[in-house]
Image (cartoon, rainbow, N blue to C red):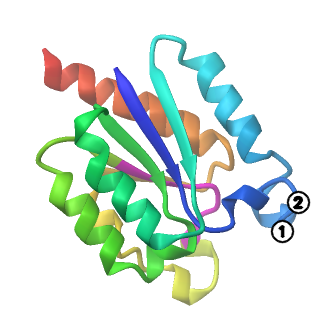
Amino acid sequence: MNILVLNGPNLNLLGTREPEIYGYTTLEDINNNLVRNYPQVNITFKQSNSESELITWIGDSPKNFSGILINPAALTHTSLGLYDALKAISNKIPAIEIHLSNTYSREEIRHKSLTAGACVGQIMGFQENSYDLGMSAIIKLLNANAG
């Protein structure tokens, strides 16, 4: 099972960026935790501040991956391009949208996700545990679909 974990803009700053919202865990810590907790899965981690790069990775993903965990970050609320890319591959591989914070408890502009509609589900508000919950969910989904 090969899972692509995509991270959007500014997530490379985790650990120092607004720790009162995002905590002190770094993106590297999150990646290391997933590798340790899910040794049965081949996990590829990518982060970009570029919308076009994320779109390209999504479009190419069915060639090598069984599923995607994506934290689109601020692009969640603005990117029809990410939505379109996720929708274009949704009949091939599933994607789950994840967020560290509960976007509904934040500024009103963050209450709408443009990308969630192209994903099979959304997990948010559990800090770095959102990634763990997302990985568990996508593994269960893929195993159920395989059986």
Q: Position of residue 3 (x, y in %)?
A: 40, 32
The quadrant holding residue 29 is: top right
Magenta region: 96-103
Q: Amino acid at mark 1?
A: Glu
- Looking at the picture, tell me which residue is in the foreground, 52 or 145: 52
Residue 20 on image: x %, y %: 85, 64
Image quadrant where residue 107 sits: bottom right
Q: Is residue 130 above or below residue 117?
A: above
Q: Report which residue position mark 2 lands on.
A: 16
Q: Residue drawn 20% across and 62% down? A: 87
- Closer to the camera, 114 or 46? 46
Q: How far is mark 2 from mark 1, CA to CA?
A: 6 Å
Q: Is residue 69 left or right of residue 8?
A: left
Q: Is residue 102 magenta?
A: yes
**Whether residue 120 is visible:** no
Q: Which residue is mark 1?
A: 18
- Based on the displayed image, in which of its 4 quarters is residue 17 positioned? bottom right
State the SS at label 2: loop
- Say left or right for 120 vs 39: left
**Mark 1 Cα-neighbour bin, 10 Å: few <14, some 14–19, many ≥20:** few
Residue 74 x %, y %? 56, 75
